[in-house]
Amino acid sequence: MIKFSLSIIFSITLFLLLAHPTYASYLYLSPDSGSFEKDDNIKMQVKLNTQDDVINGVSAYLTFPQDKLEAKSVEINKAILPIVAEELVDGNVIKFSGGNFSSLSGSDLKIGTVTFKTKALGNATLDFIAGSAAPRTLDSSDSLSLSQSKKASLQIKDDRSDGNSNPSPKPSDRPNNRCRDKEALNKTRFASIISVLTDQKAKLDTIFVLVDDFTTSQGKNSTAYLEQRKVVDAKRNQAIEKLNTFKTDAANFNCDIKNPKDALNQLKKESHTAISAVKEYKEVLRNLIKILRNV
């Protein structure tokens, strides 16, 4: 068996535990699709998913087609961004910028609300552009990925033009339409969380094996170490169980099942449970390394 020096073990551990994650925050809109009639008012929320990154500010620059939409009002969410820098419409760009003295993190952070009025028939595409940012609390580096940020596509139709005296139902009238509008976005969110958690757990597993191999080879299996190792094993198995449950239920989710809203809420709870389980695994592994250093 290859023997590693304690300094190498701790160097690898420090790198894996503290290395900056590769995932990034992204902006999205709610709703992100739908069919509307001319002169409809559409209230859209600008949202941010930090993917477990911790930030203290946001700039969201959103373009919209002025020939299809009129921005009637914009309102930044002062509950999470009390320090307001921008809250305006600049030509065809809506600008929200603000900060917070505290740190922010979450998958469904509401940055602001825009109310549009539809002006003309056709497709209206809304997209986030350069100038958007989400600085990290730790080092002010930008966590936002524009490539991962989501566009929205709105269809503006004249439902009376088909000769049908009964207009087609609006999105809110169609069963499960709101769920279907967000189904792809929710699946993307869940897949992203699963990917990050799977990667984090794999790194922790690598550290666990390295530490255990070193401890065995050096004969440092103290009583305290062995007791803490049992705790690490239990938390690792718990993380595997919670992550697998989340993976399975996320893969099976769709809007045609019975009570999709309840299923979606359950998935959100499972995602938080899986995140907590991986964090607990990480914490008890850190404690195991502290014990080893004191042997």
Image (tube, rainbow, N blue to C red):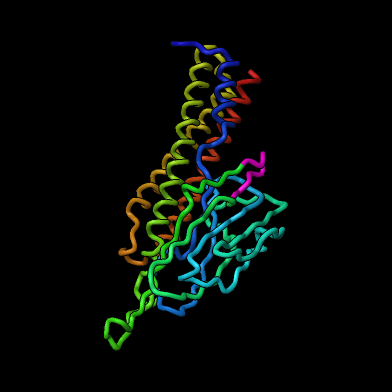
> Which quadrant of the figure contains the N terminus?
top left
Q: Is residue 268 left or right of residue 95?
A: left
Residue at (47% x, 29% y) in the render: 205
- In the image, residue 34 sits, relative to residue 6, either above or below, namely below
Is residue 289 on the magenta stretch?
no
- In the image, residue 231 sits, relative to residue 75, either above or below, namely above
Residue 175, quarter of the rendered image: bottom left
Name the main secondary structure of what is drawn in magenta.
loop
Residue at (47% x, 41% y) in the render: 196
Q: Which residues are magenta?
A: 133-141
Q: Is residue 245 left or right of residue 60?
A: left
Is residue 139 on the magenta stretch?
yes
Residue at (60% x, 30% y) in the render: 287
Q: Is residue 46 visible?
A: yes
> Which quadrant of the figure contains the C terminus?
top right
- In the image, residue 178 sits, relative to residue 18, either above or below, namely below
Residue in the foreground of this view, choosing between 152 and 130: 130
Residue 220, quarter of the rendered image: top right
Where is residue 218 shown, x and y percent of the image? 54, 12
Where is residue 65 shown, x and y percent of the image? 48, 65
Residue at (41% x, 47% y) in the render: 191
Where is residue 28 shown, x and y percent of the image? 49, 57
Q: Is residue 181 left or right of residue 165?
A: right
